[in-house]
Amino acid sequence: MPSPLPLFQITAPQIDRVVRVFYARIRAHGELGPVFAAHVRDWPAHEARIAAFWRNAILKERCYDGNPMRVHVAPPDIRPDHFPLWLSLFHEVLTQELAADTAARWGALADRIGHGLKMGLTSMRQKPDDVPSLL
């Protein structure tokens, strides 16, 4: 059976470079840097895992087997308002490192994933008495 087609044209080395540049910026970011530093002990291993996530999502390599929702929901210091910051920084790196069309396609995928993580984090942390009013 042939492997599935990638979502868009990009190479594994390009994905690795974007991830590397992105996490260098994360480490220097005033708000996101400390949050990541509290949870990431081995940056090269983390970057390799995240690059595998993106190669799995984009190139269909079947090289990632984690659960991003569980990882992001567990720590209480990861907040829903971090996701727009994360996405903004990610879009900056994509625009800097890739051709416009590739950056736009990867950015759209990142937006969908980020939105899902933000919504999942919000709903999974909701207490029963936090049910919104339908009025």
Image: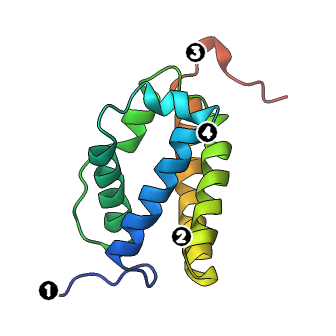
Residue under the image location 34 percent in, 42 percent down: 43
Q: Are marks 1 and 4 in contact (CB under 8 Å)?
A: no
Q: Are marks 1 and 2 in contact (CB under 8 Å)?
A: no
N-terminal label among 1 and 4: 1
Q: Position of residue 77 (x, y in %)?
A: 53, 21
> Quick one: 84 or 3, which is closer to the camera?
84
Neighbour tally class for label 4: few under 14, some 14-19, many 20 plus, Cα within 10 Å: some
- The residue mark sitting in front, 1 or 2, is 2
Q: Which residue, as the protein is rendered here, is positioned at the far top?
A: 129
Mark 4 sits on what residue? 29
Q: Which mark is residue 1?
A: 1
Q: Amino acid at mark 4?
A: His
Location of residue 79 (image quadrant): top right
Query: Mark 2: which secondary structure?
Result: helix
**Label of residue 46 in the image:** none
**Which disc number belongs to residue 106?**
2
Q: CA distance from mark 3 to mark 4?
A: 31 Å
Circles 3 and 2, Cβ within 8 Å, touching? The answer is no
Q: Which mark is residue 127?
A: 3
* CA distance separating discs 1 and 2: 26 Å
**Amino acid under disc 2:** Trp
Question: Which residue is at a point 58% across and 62% down the rendered structure image?
Answer: 93
Above or below: residue 94 compared with residue 82: below
Give me the C-alpha separation between circle 3 and circle 2. 34 Å
Q: Is residue 94 above or below residue 47?
A: below
Callout in the foreground (3, 2): 2
Q: Amino acid at mark 1?
A: Met
Residue 135 locus on image (x, y percent) = 85, 28
Percent coordinates x, y for residue 56 in the rendering: 31, 65
| Amino acid identity at mark 3 | Lys
Q: Are marks 2 and 4 in contact (CB under 8 Å)?
A: no
Residue at the image point whose x is 22% and y is 82% from the top:
3
